[in-house]
């Protein structure tokens, strides 16, 4: 079965410090991985994706993610957090047998404190 | 501006009533999706459609119905058979294989 896991329900970080939101995946094959952000009562916004190529993927708003095949991880990172980064973050993996299906993690709430 | 429009933003329904959520996109995407979001559970796929006049059940289709008569439109009906319909509903579209999902702003349904 294909799935993603976000082991932390919540991450707290001070403004200006680096942040990491963790994601691990389980797929049989080469994964297509995605990160999305959601602000309260809003839809999800795409941040970045990994399909192939460089293991370090750069995305929107200064976010980046590192694909690690040996650890089956795709952690989201940002060198310096902003208060406005406070939101709910979702990791997702595409079903390799059906490109129309995505498996989403349960989400991680990021709190950035001034 | 191109995007996905969902309406209404908030909807209240009495038990036993059907309700239809609208989803319109002007991105010229072929594939469209409906997801349900509950706190702490991530997103679950209800239905999806790859082309006009064709759609498939997702993981939690029971109690829901859809239609795809136009490329731009993919309405979702929450029927009285859905046992726990209170949730946040998200419509999405995708430009093609390998692409990412584009989401609307969501519709929050509350059953009174």
Image (tube, rainbow, N blue to C red):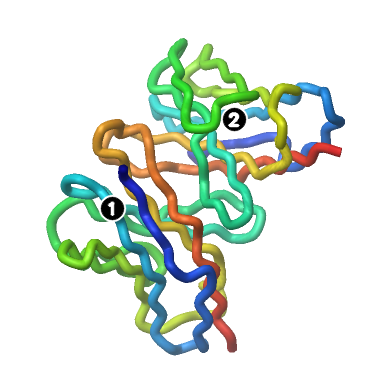
Secondary structure state at the residue bearing disc 1: strand
- From the viewer's perspective, tell me whether residue A29 is left or right of residue B14: left
Q: Where residue B69 sits in the image (x, y, percent)?
A: 53, 12
How far apart are the two marked residues, 2 and 1, measured between alpha carbons? 32 Å
Relative depth, front residue between B52 and B112? B112
- Pick the quarter of the image with the C terminus of chain B: top right
Image: B9 above or below A24: above
Residue B14's spot in the image, x, y percent?
Answer: 86, 31
The numbered disc on residue B100 is none
Q: Residues within 10 Å of mark 1 (few under 14, many from 20)?
A: some
SS class, disc 2 = strand
Do the residues at pointers 2 and 1 share their chain?
A: no
Please tell me how crowded label 2 is: few (under 14), some (14-19), or many (20+) other residues with Cα within 10 Å.
many
Name which residue lies at 48% across and 38% down: B2
Residue B25 picture location, percent across and down: 52, 31
Residue on which disc 1 sits: A26
Residue B73: image location, x then y, percent? 55, 22
| Image point (52%, 16%), residue name | B68
Residue B23 shows which numbered tag? 2
> Which residue is more in the foreground, B93 or B62?
B62
**Which residue sits at x=57%, y=19%?**
B66
Would you place residue A112 above or below residue A52 in this image?
Answer: below
């Amino acid at each position: 079965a294909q799935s993603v896991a976000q082991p932390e329900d919540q991450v707290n970080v001070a403004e200006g410090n680096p942040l990491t939101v963790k994601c691990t995946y389980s797929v049989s094959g080469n994964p297509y991985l995605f990160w999305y952000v959601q602000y309260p009562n809003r839809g999800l916004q795409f941040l970045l994706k990994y399909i192939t190529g460089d293991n370090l993927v750069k995305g929107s708003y200064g976010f980046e993610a590192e694909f690690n095949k040996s650890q089956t991880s795709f952690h989201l990172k940002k060198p310096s957090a902003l208060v406005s980064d406070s939101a709910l973050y979702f990791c997702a993996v595409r079903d390799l047998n059906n490109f129309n299906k995505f498996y989403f993690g349960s989400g991680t709430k990021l709190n950035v404190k001034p | 501006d191109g995007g996905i429009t969902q309406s209404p933003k908030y909807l209240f329904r009495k038990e036993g009533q059907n309700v239809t959520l609208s989803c319109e996109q002007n991105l010229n995407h072929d594939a469209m999706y409906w997801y349900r979001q509950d706190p702490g559970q991530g997103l679950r796929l209800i239905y999806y459609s790859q082309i006009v006049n064709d759609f498939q059940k997702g993981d939690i289709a029971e109690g829901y119905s859809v239609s795809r008569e136009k490329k731009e439109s993919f309405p979702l009906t929450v029927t009285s058979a859905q046992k726990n319909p209170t949730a946040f509903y998200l419509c999405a579209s995708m430009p093609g294989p390998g692409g990412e999902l584009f989401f609307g702003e969501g519709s929050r349904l509350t059953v009174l």
